[in-house]
Structure formats: structure tokens, C-alpha cells
Image (tube, rainbow, N blue to C red):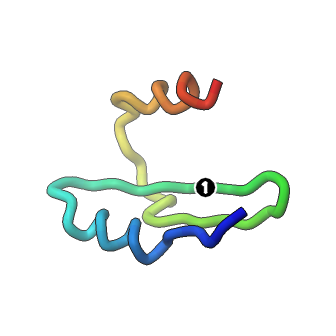
């Protein structure tokens, strides 16, 4: 696995006109990346992520 683009994603989030957050965990290494992961967000189109993964 390559280097996670944490700094680039945080820049995108800072420029975004709205709220975003993420929690990403690599199940093989246990490595975790998170940003505002403790906040609640409406689900909206989040279900599309599960469909995309399949």
C-alpha cells in the first residue's frame, strides 16, 4: 500500500463549502486515518460507497 494522502485530503476538506469527515481503517495493517470522525453526519449518499466496493 502506498502513502495515504492525509494532508491533501485535509486541504480539500478545508476548502470544501460544507462539512466532511472520514474514518478509514486498513484491515490488513490496522492503520487508521480519520478526520472529524467523532462528528455525526447525515448519511445522504453514503450507501453508494458500499455498492462501489462490491
Residue at horizontal 25%, vertical 70%?
14
- Asked whether 30 or 36 is in front, the reply is 30
Q: Position of residue 29 (x, y in %)?
A: 83, 63
Q: Residue furthest front?
A: 2
What residue sits 80% from the left and 62% below the top?
30
- Left or right of 37? Residue 26 is right
Q: Residue at x 50, y 60 (%)?
A: 38
| 49 in relation to 39, above or below | above
Q: Which residue matches tag 1?
A: 24
Q: Quadrant of residue 21?
A: bottom left
30 left or right of 20 in image: right
Q: Is residue 27 left or right of residue 42?
A: right
Q: Horizontal placement of 15 versus 28: left or right?
A: left
What percent of the width, then of the height, locates residue 13? Answer: 30, 64
Tell me the SS state at disc 1: strand
Q: Nearer the viewer, residue 5 or 43?
A: 5
Quarter of the rendering occupied by the N terminus? bottom right
> Residue 19 location, x and y as percent?
27, 55
44, above or below 22, in the image:
above
Residue 46 in which image quadrant: top left
- Please state the horizontal and vertical placement of residue 27, each as a whole percent of the image: 79, 52
Spot the residue most to the left.
17
Task: Give the total number of marks visible in the rendering.
Answer: 1
Which residue corresponds to the image point at 34% horizontal and 54% vertical from the top-left? 20
Q: Quadrant of the C terminus?
A: top right
Pick out the residue farthest to the right: 28
Q: How many other residues sit within 10 Å of disc 1, few (<14), some (14-19) or many (≥20)? A: few
Amino acid at each position: 500500500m502506498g502513502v495515504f494522502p492525509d494532508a491533501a485530503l485535509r486541504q480539500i476538506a478545508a476548502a470544501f463549502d460544507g462539512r466532511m469527515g472520514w474514518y478509514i481503517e486498513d484491515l490488513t495493517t490496522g492503520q487508521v486515518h480519520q478526520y472529524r470522525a467523532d462528528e455525526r453526519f447525515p448519511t445522504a449518499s453514503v450507501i453508494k460507497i458500499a455498492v462501489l466496493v462490491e
